[in-house]
Image (spheres, rainbow, N blue to C red):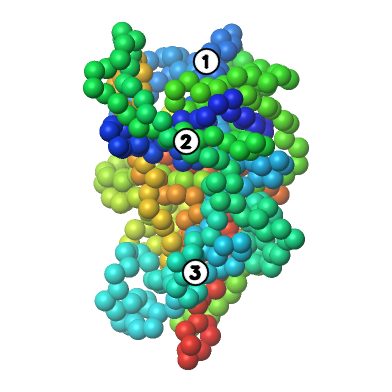
Amino acid sequence: MNLHQILLQPTDVLFFRDGRPMSGSLAGHTAAWPLPDVTNHALHAALHRASLAGVHGHDHVNAQGKRAAKDNRKFGSLVTAGPFPVRGKQWFFPRPKDAQLNGSIKITHQPLASLATDGNDNLWINSSLPDPLKYAVVNTEPPNKEAGGEPWLSQDAFNAYLCGQNFNPENASDHCLRDTDLADTEHQIGIGINPETGTTVESQFYSAHYLRLREGVRLGLFADAMDKIKGDSAQKRDLIRALLNGHPAQIIVGGQQRLCTSERHEVTGALPLPKGLMSNFNRVNQDGRENWLVKWVLLSPAIWPEIPQGTSKRGTPSKLHPGGWLPNWICQETGHVLLEVVNYEERRRRRHLNYDGRGYSSNPNIQARLVAAIVPKPLVVTGWALPNQSADNPAGGAKSTHLAVPAGAVYYFEAETADAAEKLAAALNWHGKTNGTEIKNRRSTLMGEKGFGLGVCGTWHFFNVVGRPAQ
């Protein structure tokens, strides 16, 4: 990969909406921080507008796995991560949902060891926890109406949180930001326009919210697009460099043709993203077994769709998986991690098997399982498709609506050995085993190439109830 760091500075207010209605007093969801697919689509459209010559074409494959058109898709190599707020030189990230104190990174929510069991793997009696969870996550702080914490943490604060370190900077307000520290929300009334005639639509008014970034605040993202030269995978050219070659460019971001000025920087050294733990996870003796405790925190939303029972694309049988809040790489019955650690050569071999339509058998080899989770309310992810005769939807229209797990969600795992814990961290950290110089893992089943599913690992403790021995 050849990552580029891109900072987007709006020239006006920005408009981001999802599939919720906008009519009368309903303003939709138009002023939240943009989802990863928004900036990915913006760069994709900018590449098309740039009219670059000699771009490699990709076949279009429909939902049934059949080729609908040959070489009619361009810029399939584009992958992005972000956007994240950048103020000055400091990057900010969504606050983890287990650290909910204002101006602090203190852990406020912890899994509670079972107080009553049924003699079957330590499950709670009459528990309403969904399968496959074992432990409820409880708030360890007294009730407080002001709890919740600022929604954004700086990279320094996030790293300290992951390492369990004390973080007491001279000015905590520089590291814990509210939405109003990054942007203002403006409210306007609009009139519907007929796209065919350019005239107003009778009796159609709508209310909308717009995002106006504060002075010095940018949308920061990373992008890579290495395109084959004449179809030769050994020779490639950098499309991002060709698009943003040494001078600011105007890029349309979001709805209503809103412009941002882009600024490209070379990526040297570690990326300005929080770095997850890779070893030295907490060890406990729980129910006569030793376990290593790993938690995974989402930096960007993730989409895990329902997978119907049947046969996968590579010809292997697949069970029904509910998806939703539960990652598709977690067994819905036992909670076991279904990921497999393979070397580079084996990964290439399997990729070629997929291209050829041949199957192969997986052998999950990370001895760990999901035991608890904190998952906020879902985000609505949708879009709009233009008419395309070679696509599944030739008339265009609304794309499928997905519900994404928001950034800040926390997933708790028990690993059977220290080696298993390290393998799990290498599979879940966005940087894998690297020193934070590459984006290796995007653990969202859908839209990973658009920046969904980035996460980092830390460790966790059980909450000890008064009068109960420590675990």
Q: Is mark 2 on a helix, strand or loop?
A: strand
- Crowd class of label 2 (few under 14; some 14 to 19; many from 20; radius 10 Å): few
- 430 relative to 174 in the view: left or right: left
Q: What element carries label 3?
A: strand
Q: In which quarter of the image is the N terminus?
A: top right
Residue identified by numbered label 3: 109
- Crowd class of label 3 (few under 14; some 14 to 19; many from 20; radius 10 Å): many
Q: Is residue 398 above or below residue 178?
A: above
User: What percent of the width, then of the height, locates residue 267?
Assistant: 72, 35
Please, what is the three-letter code of the amino acid marked with disc 1?
A: His
Which label belongs to residue 135? none
Q: Which of 415 and 410 is in front in this view?
A: 410
Q: In this view, does 115 lie above or below 311?
A: below
User: What percent of the width, then of the height, locates residue 377?
Assistant: 38, 53
**Closer to the observer: label 3 or label 1?**
3
> Can residue 464 be seen in this snapshot?
yes
Residue identified by numbered label 2: 186
Please, what is the three-letter code of the amino acid marked with disc 2?
A: Glu
**Closer to the observer: label 2 or label 1?**
2
Q: Residue at x 37, y 41 (%)?
A: 380
Gap between marks 2 and 3, in whole Å? 34 Å
Gap between marks 3 and 1, in whole Å? 46 Å
Residue identified by numbered label 1: 48
